[in-house]
Image (cartoon, rainbow, N blue to C red):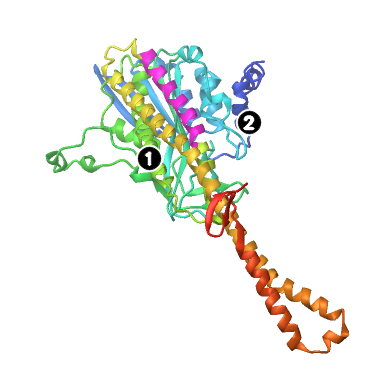
Amino acid sequence: MPISYLDYIFAQSQQHPSLRDLCRFLGQAQTTDPCRIVCLEFRVVEGSLLRSIHEISDLATSLRYWSSADEIASGKVSGRVLIIEDLNNNVVGALGSTFDIDPLFFSYHIDHPTFNSFEPSSTISLPSKAYSQNFVTLRYSRAIEFMDIGFSRTLMTTSNVTRKVKILPSNSKRHIGFRQHCCSVLFMITKSGTWLGLILVDAINTNNYIASSGKEYTIQSRPFQGGFEDFMSPKTYSQCQSSDPTALAHLKRSSLLEDLLFYWGDASPSVFKADHPTLLSIANYPLRIVAGEWKVYVEVMSSSIKLHEYSTAITAGTNILTHLDSDLRSLETWGRRQMQNVAKLRHIIRFLNFHMASEIEPGEYAALVEDYEHIITMIDTYGNRMASMIPVVASLVQIADTRRSLKEAENVTRLTNLALFFIPLTFVTGLFSMNNDISAQGMKRYFSVAIPFLVAVFVLQAGKHTDITGLQLVGGVRREAT
């Protein structure tokens, strides 16, 4: 009896532990939200290659039709690009069993994050293994600006494929966070002889998030500084005067699927050949969008550097120490982010360099490699600047703690002086109480003895004073204490 594709994945997970995240994802309840699927179909009609874009409501029916004898015999379909938003377990089973897709393609896209875990190791593949794969996984962090955060600094999305959201420390009501994103691209030749491009993207950015307590919140958010820059050449003024409604169309930047449709609807990539596409040509638009997102990430790093610039004119207190301790942890976290993100970018550059060798026109990809190299340089520059701030913050913590100790020492000095006022009076009172004849002479004799004695004590106390620095003050002259 043949096994299902899902059973095949569970069996392979024993040999490949990197599939465990995918197994956990597939083991979830089948009541997942439906995902959105858009198909870009390239057909040969009367010798011309035509492209059509349509949404797929029933994937299983479409897969059966594409595999039917009549559709294959027609020979009109050159290939298809499927863009799938917010993957669910039903789609994994349908696509995997129909096209015999490597389970690692889905596993690298689904990292199954949790609140109390580091980034899973299944997202990392050795270069030698990545070269033999017919897919690429593009990971990036989207910078998001939140209007108000009053509880958790770590959130989760409510999508089928959950992503972690980390909120950065802030001194104002504006809070900036990073939402993990992933775009996976696959290219293959199907059994029917047509080519297939498969692009997996994350769910649309919504305002619904889950906190570590498990409670769902609605938080107003928007892309930081409006999102990534459009990499296409802008339309001229005369083009915008035309009656074409698409002339003034713009990116929504809330959904990667919508952004890809915006670019594909305008024109196919210049390096894309519908009769003979490559993995690199299908991943062209995702690679450029991801580069734009990383550019915004660098801008957030620059903003964070300004946030961590300090003055030595700090005050002593619990609040400033708490603030500095938070900044110290934040700077250390930036160092970890720097290492992880540079590794992700290096993975993309290796992918580009390897596949550029088989491209007819590698010039455009060479420019893309230069863009990613520039981003890595900026991340390293800002990351090293933040690393150099760690000793500064640690020194400020020591300064603030020392000033707090000095403040406490001043309070102790006041309490000592107050006690010093009553101790001589108490001593004289004790002497007078030992003799009834003296006590009978009244308060006049008491004050005539107590006040001179009190003055003498204070004169002796003021004549010699040692400060906390180890320098002794004698007669108003400062000398080294012995």
- Residue 191: x and y in percent read 46, 13
Q: Element under label 1?
A: helix
- Residue 253: x and y in percent read 36, 41
Q: Observer-nearest residue: 230 or 283?
A: 230
Overall secondary structure of the magenta section? helix
Find the distance from the CA under tag 2 to the CA under tag 1.
Answer: 38 Å
Q: Nearer the viewer, mark 2 or mark 1?
A: 1
Q: Observer-nearest residue: 320 or 285?
A: 320
Depicted 90 relative to depicted 282: above or below = below
Relative placement, left or right, of 123 versus 272 is right
Q: Is residue 373 magenta?
A: no
Q: Amino acid at mark 2?
A: Arg
Residue drawn 56% across the image and 57% down it: 317
Residue drawn 37% across the image and 27% down it: 377
Q: Write down the residue under mark 2.
A: 24
Residue drawn 23% across the image and 40% down it: 246
Residue 320: give its label. none
Q: Which residues are magenta?
A: 334-355
Q: Amino acid at mark 1?
A: Ser
Q: Quadrant of residue 52?
A: top left
Q: Observer-nearest residue: 292 or 89?
A: 292
Report if residue 36 is visible in the image.
Answer: no
Q: Earlier in the sequence, mark 2 or mark 1?
A: 2
- Give neighbour class at mark 2: few <14, some 14-19, many 20+ (Cα, 10 Å): few
Instruction: Give the residue at the far left of this rendering.
Output: 238
Q: Write down the residue under mark 1.
A: 302
Relative placement, left or right, of 329 versus 459 is left
